[in-house]
Structure formats: structure tokens, C-alpha cells
């Protein structure tokens, strides 16, 4: 399968690793994470669309959704790929939940892509964010076929509001569209399914009703969204047997996004017969990611690797 060159804003090549510029929060977390092994030099992001993104409000950087790849050297690839959706209340994108996660996955042989999706703080509303995430998932599946990775091992991870977007993707995905005369031959990515093979939800926003994070809801849906839309985006109500298997973790101390969000979603998964691994830790503030020297995170990362092996996501 061939893909048109205009998807690239820059270029990326496999090469000995060079230090990646990280945000201060990511640097602080290094004390609690294993050293990064060489994987790839990243020189540029990838645009989701060749021209203006559907519904774009302009041509500013914030109007252009992109994927930043963290590629794994061929001899270290596991064949699995992760799409990373940083949190930030649908108003920003947290670096430590983007680049920080991508480095960790790549160090373990998992190809990773960080999505810069469009935000409510820049004037966007649902379904723009879901459309960006779905488009990105389709691209990763197509890239896996192109690059010799496993197109049946494409996962998504999201934190906080990014966890809500990931939960929306695992419950509101579109199946693959068969190729045919109606398919745009210049854009075969649309033929791919947007269903993740699994989801990882870190202290996620799930409900937009009783236990919601009001900032995320406002940025995604606006001031006075219709009740039906609120229900549709309260993802604990949208789980079906087709929903992707999920790993969830939260802390009881989370004061920004109550732990009930993860409990509600896990309960819905169980009722639908969807495989689920739920981890509730006693201590820890919201937004920890991998933690830092002063704010350590629970051992969720070790548990995630164990679950990946249980699910045969890592062979």
C-alpha cells in the first residue's frame, strides 16, 4: 500500500539515538524511569491530512493535527504500536503524558506516536477531537502494514482528558471500510478500522454527569450541550461487547477527576464481557504519569507490561 508524500511535515530516519528535548516535568520523572535505549532520531511530525484538516478554523499550528513518531530500531521492534493521547482538559497537551510515554514505549520495543489533536481552547468542539484520534488510529494501522509491524496490535493510551478521548475511541470507533469504487484511491487510510486493539486509560475522565471534570466537559462540548450529547460522551453508557479490552488505573486521592470515573467504566466493561484490568491505588495526586523524584507514581507501568503479555500484545 502506498501513501502520498504530503503527509510528512518533516522527515524521520532510523539512526543512533540523540537526546530528545523534554519538558521540565519529563526531566524530573527520569529519576523514576529506566534509562532510554537507542531507538530513533525524530526530525519531524506527520500531518493527519494532506491539506486543511476537516473543520479547520485556520492554518495556524493549532489548526493542524499531527503525529510525532518514536520509531524503534528494526532489531528491537516487538511489532506493537501505541497511539498516545496526552491529557490537559481538552485545553492543552501535557508533555509528560506525551513524549514521556512515547520514550518509555520505544525503549521497550513498542513503536509510539504522539497525537497533537485539536483543542477546545482553540475553538474546537466534539467531534473534532474524536475525528483526529480516529484518523490517527487508521494511519497507525496503515503504517504497520507498510512498515512490517502487526496491524492487529495497535493500542491507544490516554491520560485524564486524553483518557476520555481514548475511552471515546474504544467505544465510538468505526470498522474498516472495504476498498471499492467509492474509496478515494489517493487516501486509502480511510479503508482502515479506527478500533484500537486495546486501550490504556490513566486517571481518565469518563462521565460527564455526576463525577465529571467540568473543565474537560466545557472545552469539549461547550457551555450548554444537549442532554443527548452529554449522554453519548459519558462513555460508561456506551460500552458494548465490541468495546476494546482496557487497562485502567486511578488513585483514591485524585481530587481533580474522581476515582469513580474508572470504577464506572470498569463496571460497564465487566457487564459487557469485555476484558479489563483495573488498578486503584491509595496514594497519588492527579496527573502523575510516570511520576517524579518528589511525586512518585504507583507501579502501574509494571502492571501494564504484565497485562500486555497477558493480552499477547507483547509476544
Image (spheres, rainbow, N blue to C red):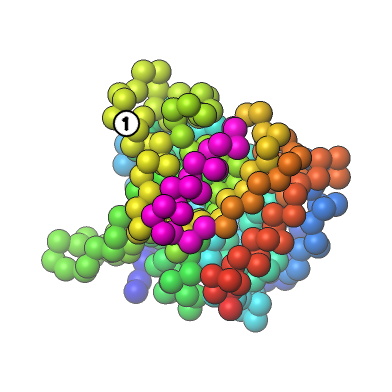
Picture quadrant of residue 43: bottom right
Q: Residues within 10 Å of mark 1 (few under 14, many from 20)?
A: few
Q: Residue drawn at (60%, 37%), measured in percent from left and top? A: 259
Residue farthest toward the front in the current orientation of the protein: 271
Taking the image as drawn, is residue 54 in sight? yes
Vertical arrangement, residue 132 with respect to residue 146, above or below: above
The one nearer the camera, 178 or 10, is: 178
Q: Position of residue 9 (x, y in %)?
A: 49, 53
Q: Position of residue 116 (x, y in %)?
A: 51, 44
Q: Quadrant of the C terminus?
A: bottom right
Relative side of 229 to 30, left or right:
left
> Is residue 259 rendered magenta in the image?
yes
> Is residue 78 rendered magenta in the image?
no
Q: Residue drawn at (76%, 47%), measured in percent from left and top? A: 297
Taking the image as drawn, is residue 10 in sight? no
Relative side of 258 to 35, left or right:
left
Residue farthest toward the left in the current orientation of the protein: 181
Picture quadrant of residue 142: bottom left
Q: Quadrant of the N terminus?
A: bottom left
The one nearer the camera, 207 or 288, is: 207
Q: What's the magenta bit mostly, secondary-structure-wise?
A: helix
Secondary structure under tag 1 reads helix
Which residue is disc 1 drawn over?
A: 229
Q: Position of residue 234 (x, y in %)?
A: 41, 36
Vertical arrangement, residue 77 with respect to residue 24, above or below: below
Q: Which segment did they paint magenta?
A: 257-276
Q: Residue drawn at (50%, 49%), measured in percent from left and top? A: 266
Q: How many marks?
A: 1
Residue farthest toward the top in the current orientation of the protein: 223
Q: Position of residue 284 (x, y in %)?
A: 74, 39
Relative side of 53 to 103, left or right:
left
Amino acid at each position: 500500500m502506498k501513501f502520498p508524500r504530503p503527509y510528512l511535515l518533516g522527515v524521520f530516519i532510523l539512526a543512533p539515538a540523540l537526546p530528545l528535548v523534554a519538558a521540565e516535568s519529563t526531566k524530573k520523572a527520569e529519576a523514576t524511569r529506566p534509562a532510554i535505549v537507542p531507538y530513533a532520531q525524530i526530525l519531524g511530525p506527520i500531518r493527519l491530512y494532506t491539506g486543511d484538516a476537516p473543520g479547520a478554523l485556520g492554518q495556524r499550528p493549532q489548526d493542524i493535527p499531527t503525529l510525532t513518531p518514536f520509531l524503534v530500531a528494526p532489531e528491537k521492534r516487538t511489532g506493537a504500536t501505541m497511539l498516545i493521547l496526552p491529557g490537559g482538559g481538552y485545553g492543552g497537551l501535557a508533555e509528560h503524558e506525551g513524549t514521556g510515554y512515547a520514550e518509555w514505549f520505544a525503549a521497550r520495543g513498542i513503536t509510539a506516536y504522539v497525537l497533537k489533536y485539536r483543542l477546545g481552547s482553540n475553538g474546537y468542539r466534539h467531534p473534532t477531537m474524536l475525528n483526529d484520534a480516529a484518523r490517527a488510529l487508521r494511519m497507525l494501522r496503515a503504517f504497520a502494514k507498510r512498515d512490517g509491524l502487526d496491524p492487529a496490535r495497535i493500542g491507544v493510551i490516554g491520560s485524564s482528558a486524553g483518557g476520555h478521548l481514548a475511552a471515546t475511541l474504544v467505544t465510538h470507533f468505526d470498522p474498516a471500510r472495504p476498498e471499492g469504487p467509492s474509496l478515494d484511491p489517493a487516501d486509502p487510510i480511510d479503508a482502515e478500522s479506527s478500533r484500537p486493539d486495546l486501550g490504556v486509560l490513566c486517571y481518565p475522565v469518563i462521565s460527564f454527569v455526576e463525577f465529571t471534570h467540568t473543565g474537560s466537559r466545557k472545552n469539549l462540548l461547550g457551555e450548554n450541550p444537549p442532554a443527548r450529547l452529554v449522554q453519548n460522551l459519558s462513555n460508561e453508557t456506551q460500552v458494548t461487547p465490541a468495546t476494546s479490552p482496557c487497562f485502567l488505573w486511578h488513585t483514591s486521592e485524585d481530587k481533580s477527576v474522581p476515582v469513580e470515573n474508572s470504577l464506572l467504566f470498569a463496571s460497564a466493561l465487566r457487564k459487557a464481557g469485555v476484558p479489563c484490568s483495573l488498578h486503584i491505588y491509595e496514594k497519588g495526586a492527579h496527573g502523575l504519569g510516570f511520576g517524579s523524584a518528589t511525586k512518585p507514581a504507583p507501579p502501574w507501568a509494571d502492571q501494564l507490561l504484565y497485562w500486555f503479555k497477558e493480552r499477547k500484545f507483547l509476544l
